[in-house]
Image: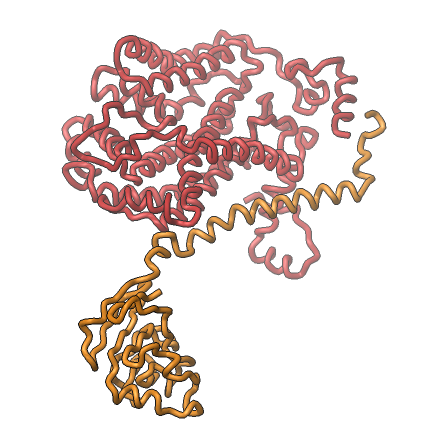
Amino acid sequence: MSGHSSFQTNNPVLKWIEYRLPIFGFINDSLVVYPTPKNLNYWWNMGSLAGMMLVLQIITGIVLAMHYTPHADMAFASTEHIMRDVNYGWLLRYMHANGGSMFFIVVYIHIFRGMYYGSYKEPRELLWWLGIIIFILMMATAFMGYVLPWGQMSFWGATVITNLFSAVPLVGEEIVAWLWGGFAVDQPTLNRFYSLHYLLPFVIFAVVFVHLWALHVHKSNNPLGIDIKGPQDTIPFHPYYTVKDLYGMGIFGIIFALLLFFAPNLLGEPDNYIPANPLVTPTHIVPEWYFLPFYAILRAIPDKLFGVIAMFASIFILFALPWLDTSKVRSARFRPVYKMLFWAFFLNCFVLGYLGAKPPEGIFIVIGRLSTALYFLFFLVLPFIGWFERPRKLPESIATAVLESSGDDGGGGGAPDAAAAKAEDRG
Amino acid sequence: MADSTGGDTHDPSRRDFLYVAAAGLGAVGTVGFVWPLVDQMNPSQDVLALSSIEVDLSGIEVGQSITVSWRGKPVFIRHRTEAEIAKAKDVAMADLPDPEGDDVRAEKPQWLVLVGVCTHLGCVPLGQAGEYNGWFCPCHGSHYDTSGRIRKGPAPTNLPVPKYVFLDDNNIKIG
């Protein structure tokens, strides 16, 4: 992909392989000597964590598939069989279920990181698009995976979400029947969801590679949001960022383990331990936490079709972000107005998430509509901010900014002192 | 602090210790993660719980056999005739590829209990067939005698006798 590699070896076997398939050069160029901005902060750990979670989900998923039965009469029992009978089945299932949540946490931070530091801007628009495609695929995968245990929440979640498509004019009912393979969510639905739940992670895996390909063309963005101007702005990926990523994985692993071993059902719904009953809907049905903001938007609109349109629009509008944002400055550090707007948007997403878990009644409806309006308002005012906002002065280069250790990070003292202090810290 | 800058790079033993400790801990963690992935393929608790069955023998007349399923495999229970018992006992040990006395294989001579899986490659042998009128495996031509012992053909060992006990005269528990 990147022309001549800097990979050098005297090992004849490696040379023989490298001449025919330059795989060592590829690994060397993309994971070892790969030039990375020297000023990346810990928010840049989320990419590798997301990759790790994808692999973990695939591994635990393949293993669970060895014990699970995708049949309406046996799915629930086989899930309990995994929990009670299969060796370490409880661990593997909890790891997979909570792993989905951890995957979404990491990806949401990753997306907000991209928004804060303007990582979606020219020339990374396609990189951003590929990320949104991964996000949409993840949501489809997670939704279908949640149906598989065939509990009450599985069944009624599947019913509600598939019924979204009945809002489509003229052919809505036909589409829903096609999705179901029948007149209600039933055996055919479960079986196809299982098939697709197995397939989609591998599609995600492929898109992740394209995502990384696009990333490696113009390299990582950075907290300053300015371009790499030369070798003085970068450090090799290995050992600097391999070690930083591993450290992040360690911290992340501790948090994951706390959830997994001490509160494995914290993010789940107790109703999903009741076998699916097509004749009775649970009194209060909510999706998994990672869908709540979108669910809140769906319910905020008092019209079936427009509610569905608003919900899908809230995701698809992300595709337009690189063009809605008219500012040439990437990082919110240098954009006082955008920075405020970003945090308002960020908090509003939590408000939406909170509302999505509440029953649609009384004050929650009012706040829900207000929050939904604010969500879209962010994207509507964004083009105008670029025109009137006076960004702060950008540093000359990453290297000069790092050496000056500017006050933005709260680093104390004058420039030479700060540089000396940094050197000491490494000792 | 000031003179410690870069000091650790000159102390190989300290740096080596860090490398070894990190790699060692990583190896322990990897094994801890991989073991559940491996162990989940071992028989699960519900499979292990089905590892013994009880069989009522009262309906099996002399000269009849039944096949029951134990751990997913066929188990032959044969009510042997006097002729078969005599034939099984009247064999010189030297003639047997896998020498074993009939009295060892059948606790009560009239009842023979065998795992009906050919010890060659796992096919189910046919009863009262073959050159020794015991069992004959159609897959690759192994001949077993009336005690279920290998006499001719590629199978290396006798048909195994599962662990069983007589609960009373007419009931046995296999496994």
Residue at 24 percent across and 85 percent down: it is: B81
Residue at 47 percent across and 38 percent down: it is: A53
| Image side of residue B19 versus residue B163, left or right | right
| Image side of residue B132 versus residue A403, left or right | left
Image location of residue B78, percent across then percent down: 26, 77
* Chain identifier matching the orange colour in the rendered picture: B
Front residue of this view, candidates A378 and B159: B159
* Chain identifier matching the red colour in the rendered picture: A
**Residue A57 figure quarter:** top left
Can residue A97 be seen here?
yes
Q: State which quarter of the image contains the C terminus of chain A.
A: top right
Image location of residue B40, percent across then percent down: 43, 51
**Residue B76 figure quarter:** bottom left
Front residue of this view, candidates A30 and B76: B76
Image location of residue A290, percent across then percent down: 38, 27
Q: How is the image coloured?
A: by chain
Can residue A126 be seen here?
no
Q: State which quarter of the image contains the N terminus of chain A.
A: top right
Front residue of this view, candidates A324 and A374: A374
Residue at 40 percent across and 24 percent down: it is: A318
Residue at 42 percent across and 32 percent down: it is: A101
Compared to residue A345, the image places residue B153 above or below, namely: below
Image location of residue A372, percent across then percent down: 33, 14
